[in-house]
Image (tube, rainbow, N blue to C red):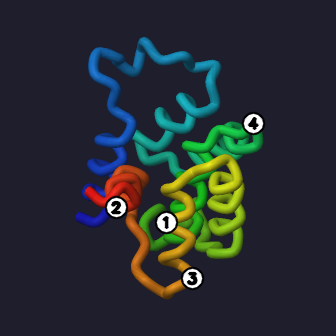
Amino acid sequence: MKKQLVAAAFAALVFVPGLAPAQRDTRDPWEQALIAYEVGRYGEAVSWLSIAGENNDVRAQQMLGLMYVYGEALYGPAVPRDVGLGRAWLYRAEAQGSGTARFVIARLDRGEPVPTSLALADNQASGE
């Protein structure tokens, strides 16, 4: 049930009306990550997100941060929980001006629950 909720929240984040998976630019690491994530290949998603994150894709940096913060609790053994690494990706996104990353980092610092998806984090960071 938890994985279904996370998958639904993530789908809400990445769904672009009128853009079917076959129409995506599969040369783009972010798009490759989304494809892998959508079918539950989380380890592969992390690999693609890492490439996108290293290329300064803020979305990938934020998502990697959240994935590592939750780790295997949400993503199974393919994504080990590593809060330090999660924070490192979130700090990189924050350095590029991400209010969402700043919001998540602040919650981690205060020991508060962290949103389980970028969609939730974006909504909470913007006060919705």
Q: Is residue 45 above or below residue 107?
A: above
Q: Are the two marked residues, 4 and 1, in contact with CB atoms closer than 8 angstroms?
A: no
Quadrant occupied by the N terminus: bottom left
Q: Report crowding for label 4: few under 14, some 14 to 19, many 20 or more residues within 10 A (C-alpha).
A: few
Q: Nearer the viewer, mark 3 or mark 4?
A: 3
**Which amino acid lies under the numbered mark 4 shown in the image of this protein?**
Asn
Placement of the C terminus among the 4 image quadrants = bottom left
Disc number lying in front (4 or 1): 1
User: Which residue corresponds to the image point at 42% horizontal and 15% vertical from the top-left?
Assistant: 22
Q: Are marks 2 and 1 in contact (CB under 8 Å)?
A: yes
Calculate the distance from the C-alpha at mark 1 to the C-alpha at mark 3.
Answer: 10 Å
Residue occupying the far bottom of the picture: 111
Q: Secondary structure at mark 3?
A: helix
Dot 2 or dot 1, earlier in sequence: 1
**Neighbour tally class for label 1: few under 14, some 14-19, many 20 plus, Cα within 10 Å:** many
Question: Residue 125: image x %, image y %?
Answer: 40, 60
Calculate the distance from the C-alpha at mark 2 to the C-alpha at mark 4: 26 Å
Residue bearing mark 3: 109
Q: Return the residue at label 2.
A: 124
Q: Which mark is residue 103?
A: 1
